[in-house]
Image (tube, helix red, strand yellow):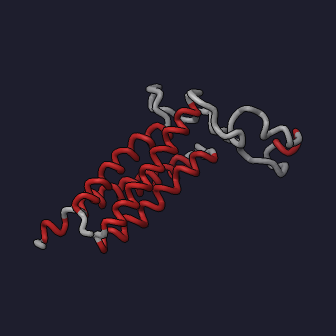
Amino acid sequence: MTESSDFAPKQPALAATLGSFALLAGAFVFQAFGYAPCPMCLWQRWPHAIAIVIGLLFLTTRLRALAALGALSMLVSAGLGLFHAGVEQRWWSGPSSCTGSGDTLSGLSGTELLPGAGGPSHLVLCDEIVWDTWGLGITMAGWNFLFSLLFLALWLVALRKARA
């Protein structure tokens, strides 16, 4: 293999890995600015963290199986992002454990819901939109869905170019 053909599968995998790193870092920056994540937001972070590890391994080995796992992790991320965006837009119901149905709060007393009283310091529900892009209706979950599809495509290109 020549040097340039050896690098070919690394380019899309590197872009996808850096993209997952940027999204994960961005999530922590938003959190630092006071946008507390809901449980579904936290679920969406895991596939990106896994994709970063897979990407680092792929960049050293270029094994097709790792590219396939990277693609799978982004497929899961896209699915979670789409599901969460749909919950936020009220297209479908989300998990009762983190939506505004009230069922999950029924076991808590008023005192437990007060900040500093042993209850949650900031309760964030999965069906609340805490930030959307300048009023365009694209939430953080929506962006995660769109970028995860892009990273999925990059992983598929790396898979096609990788060695067995």
The correct choice, above or below, for 121 with respect to 18 in the image is above
Residue drawn 35% across and 50% down? Answer: 151
Q: Nearer the viewer, residue 42 or 132?
A: 42
Say if residue 117 shows up in the picture. Answer: yes
Percent x, y for residue 20? 41, 55
Single out the residue that lies furthest toward the left.
Answer: 2
The residue lying toward the viewer, choosing from 155 and 139, is: 155
In the picture, the quarter occupied by the N terminus is bottom left
Side of 54 where 60 appears, left or right? left
Q: Position of residue 112 (x, y in %)?
A: 85, 45
Please say whether residue 140 is visible from this viewpoint. Answer: no
Which residue is at a point 27% across and 69% down the rendered structure image?
164
Would you say 143 lies left or right of 86 here?
Answer: left
* Relative vertical location of residue 158 with respect to residue 124 in this rendering, above or below: below
- Residue occupying the point 47% across, 62% down: 50
Is 20 on the left-hand or right-hand side of 81?
A: left
Q: How many marks?
A: 0
Q: Outermost residue, front direction? A: 164
Q: Report the residue at 79% width, 45% height from top.
A: 115
Q: Is residue 105 above or below residue 39?
A: above
Residue 15 lies in what quarter of the image?
A: bottom left
Report whether 48 appears left or right of 90: left
Q: Position of residue 157 (x, y in %)?
A: 26, 54
Tell which of 121 and 56 is nearer to you.
56
Q: Is residue 17 above or below residue 89?
A: below
